[in-house]
Amino acid sequence: MIRTVSVTLATLFFTASVAMAQMNSSILPDVPEGVQAMSLLSEELRAGTPSESVLENLSTAKALYESDPGNADSIVWYGRRLGYAQDYRGAIKVFSEGIEKHPDDARFYRHRGHRYISIREFDRAIADFEKAATLIEGTEDEVEPDGAPNPAGIPVSTLHSNIWYHLALSYYLVGDLDNALRVYEIAIAQAPNDDMRVATTHWHYMTLRLLGRDEDAVAVLEPIHEDMNVIESMPYHQLCLLYKGEAETGRVLDSNITEAGGDSAMYGIANWHYYNGRTDDAKAGFEEMIAKSGWASFGRIAAESDLARKF
C-alpha cells in the first residue's frame, strides 16, 4: 500500500538511489548546498515549498519507481514529479538514470533538457533536445500526458512538438536567434492544435522581430484569430492578438491563469516594448519580473537572459 504524505521534504527531495549518486557529477554544475541553480544575474535560486498535492503525487511516483526502478514510465514520472516539486537537480539525476537504462527513449532527453532550462544550463539543454530530435526521426508522434492537467483535462502537447518547441526556446535563451528561427519553423509545422500553435507563434514572431524581419513576423501571425480553440495557452493567444493590434496590454495580463501564464504575459509585453524601441519600458518590465519570487517559468528565465545580455 502506498503511504500517504507524512514524509518530510528532506526525505522526498534528493532521494535518488546510491547508483545515481555515483553517476558522473558532470551532469550538474556545482552550486552552494541547498541551491537549485544560480540565476543569470548571479543570484542563488532555491526551491519553494510544494503544495500537499504535489508532495502526494511525488510520494506516489517515488513508490512506483522504487517498486520497479527499471521501468521507463516509472522513471519518467518520478523525474517529472521531482521537477514539479522544484527539485530540478534531483529530476536531472533521475532522467540521467533513465538515459543510462533506456538510451533510445527520447522522453528522457526531452525532460532532462527541460530541467536544464530550469537551472539555466542552456547548452546542456540544447544538446539533449538535439539528441531527442534524432531519436524521434521517423517515429509516430504521441500525446504527452500532463502532470498538472488543465481545467479541461485535455493534454495539448505531444512528444515531438515539445522537443522542437523547447529546442527552439533553448537557442532563443542563449541569443542564437538564427538557430531558434530554424527550429521554430519546424515546431510550428509540428503544432498539433491551437494551444501549441499560439505558443509557438508567439516565440516565432518575437524571434523574427528581434532579427529585424518585421514583414516575415507579420506573416506568421496570419493564421491567428480571435476564435481559436485555445484551452490553456490564453496568454500566448492574447499576446499574438496584441502583436496584430487586436488586443490591449491589459487584456493580455488579464488572460493569465497560472503564475507561469502571468510571467509569459509580462515577458511578451516587455519584449514587445523592446523591439519597438521602448527600451526603458522593456527594462522596467524585465526588472519587475526578476523582483517576483517565482523563478522557474520560461518568461522569467527569458527576462533574466535579456537583462544579462542586453542591459
Image (spheres, rainbow, N blue to C red):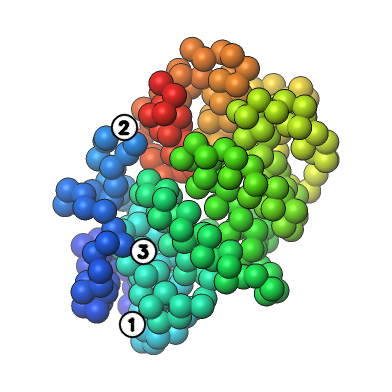
| Residue pointed to by mark 3 | 91
Element assignment for label 1: helix
Residue 220 visible in the current orientation: yes
Mark toward the viewer: 1 or 2: 2
Quarter-of-image position of residue 23: bottom left
Question: How many residues crowd mark 2 within 10 Å: few (<14), some (14–19), many (20+)?
Answer: few
Q: Quadrant of the N terminus?
A: bottom left
Q: Is residue 70 above or below residue 231?
A: below
Mark 1 to mark 3: distance in Å? 15 Å
Which comes before the other along the chain, label 1 or label 3? 1
* Residue 119: x %, y % from top left: 36, 49
| Amino acid type, callout 3 | Ala
Residue 41 disc label: 2
Q: Quadrant of the C terminus?
A: top left
Is 179 or 117 nearer to us in this picture? 179
Quarter-of-image position of residue 115: bottom left
Residue at image coords 60%, 28%: 210
| Amino acid type, callout 1 | Glu
| Residue pointed to by mark 1 | 66
Is 219 or 47 nearer to us in this picture? 219
Question: How many residues crowd mark 1 within 10 Å: few (<14), some (14–19), many (20+)?
Answer: some
Mark 3 to mark 2: distance in Å? 23 Å
Mark toward the viewer: 1 or 3: 3
